[in-house]
Image (spheres, rainbow, N blue to C red):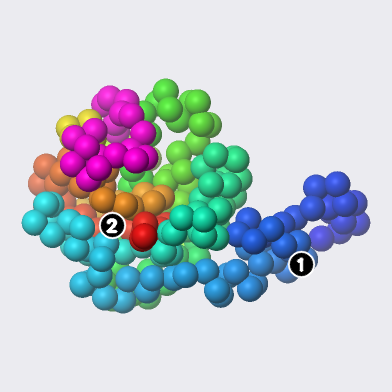
């Protein structure tokens, strides 16, 4: 940082979005302690993991993983709350780059052709100002050297929030609301489908079903976090 940055930091201190501690000059978004101590899943190393199992018998997924465990009142919940509802949009690409550095070397996630984020309905995106999954995908794209496709998968209808819905109600809420355009662009591609938080997998399942209608498409899934009790 230069003198101007130091002056600005007096009034707008740079803090870790996980724990609230002040960041040192060489730190960004997360402090070094949280960078290493946040609860990582390591699911990208094992195809038989809890995220993959969500889709067994429901939709054909090549492999699936999530970066962190998401627990109520935990630091990961704090980060994602800051990201989605407080407009700290720098969190998405930052976490995406961190996870992308792991995925690019993971055997299970080789030969990815493109990244597609779970889309928001245009009205919701306009209200929020951004698509959190797309920002996470941007970071993954940069780290993995894989193109981020922002247009081929879209949401036909707005849906209600998934919070507090049962597994069946979550699935019912998103059934048949996603569709694909530019199918020729996707034909034969191995797509990495990304979301912010995966709980029951219903939204990702609905997206995957739409993508798998395209000839030769294969789908793998990653999320920033996986909800656990």
Q: Quadrant of the C terminus?
A: bottom left
Q: Do the residues bearing badges 2 and 1 touch, measured as CB atoms within 8 Å?
A: no
Which residue is pictured at 43% across the width and 64% down the height?
A: 68
The reply, left or right, for residue 132 in relation to residue 115 is right
Which residue is pictured at 32% across the width and 26% down the height?
A: 158
Q: Secondary structure at mark 2?
A: strand
Q: Which mark is residue 2?
A: none
Q: Position of residue 7 (x, y in %)?
A: 90, 51
The reply, left or right, for residue 175 in relation to residue 14 is left
Residue 158 vertical position relative to residue 92 in the rendered view, above or below = above
Residue bounds of the magenta highlight: 154-173
Which residue is pictured at 29% across the width and 33% down the height?
A: 154
Q: Which mark is residue 24?
A: 1
For residue 3, say whether it is visible.
yes
For residue 152, say whether it is visible.
no
> Dot 2 surroundings within 10 Å: few (below 14), some, or many (20 or more)?
many
Which residue is pictured at 11% across the width and 52% down the height?
A: 58
| Depth check, front residue: 44 or 68 | 68
Q: Secondary structure at mark 1?
A: loop
Q: Is residue 5 magenta?
A: no
Q: Which mark is residue 221?
A: 2
Q: Position of residue 92 (x, y in %)?
A: 51, 51
Query: What's the distance in space between the residues labelled 2 and 1, CA to CA?
Result: 34 Å
Q: Position of residue 24 (x, y in %)?
A: 76, 67
Q: Quadrant of residue 210?
A: top left
The reply, left or right, for residue 170 in relation to residue 147 is left
Nearest to N terminus: mark 2 or mark 1: 1
> Dot 1 surroundings within 10 Å: few (below 14), some, or many (20 or more)?
few
Q: Is residue 159 magenta?
A: yes
């Amino acid at each position: 940082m230069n003198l101007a940055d130091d002056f600005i930091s007096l009034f707008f201190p740079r803090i870790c979005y996980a724990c609230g501690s002040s960041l040192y000059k060489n730190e960004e978004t997360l402090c070094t302690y949280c960078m290493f101590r946040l609860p990582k899943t390591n699911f990208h190393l094992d195809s038989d993991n809890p995220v993959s199992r969500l889709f067994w018998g429901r939709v054909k997924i090549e492999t699936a993983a999530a970066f962190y465990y998401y627990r109520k009142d935990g630091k990961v919940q704090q980060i994602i709350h800051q990201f989605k509802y407080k407009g700290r949009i720098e969190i998405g690409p930052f976490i995406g780059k961190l996870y992308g550095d792991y995925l690019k070397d993971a055997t299970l996630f080789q030969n990815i052709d493109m990244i597609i984020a779970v889309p928001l309905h245009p009205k919701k995106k306009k209200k929020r100002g951004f698509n959190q999954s797309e920002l996470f995908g941007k970071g993954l794209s940069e780290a993995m050297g894989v193109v981020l496709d922002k247009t081929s998968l879209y949401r036909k209808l707005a849906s209600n929030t998934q919070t507090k819905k049962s597994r069946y109600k979550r699935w019912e809420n998103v059934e048949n609301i996603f569709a694909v355009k530019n199918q020729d662009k996707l034909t034969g591609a191995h797509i990495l489908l990304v979301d912010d938080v995966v709980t029951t997998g219903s939204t990702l399942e609905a997206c995957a079903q739409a993508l798998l209608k395209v000839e030769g498409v294969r789908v793998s899934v990653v999320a920033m976090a996986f909800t656990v009790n």
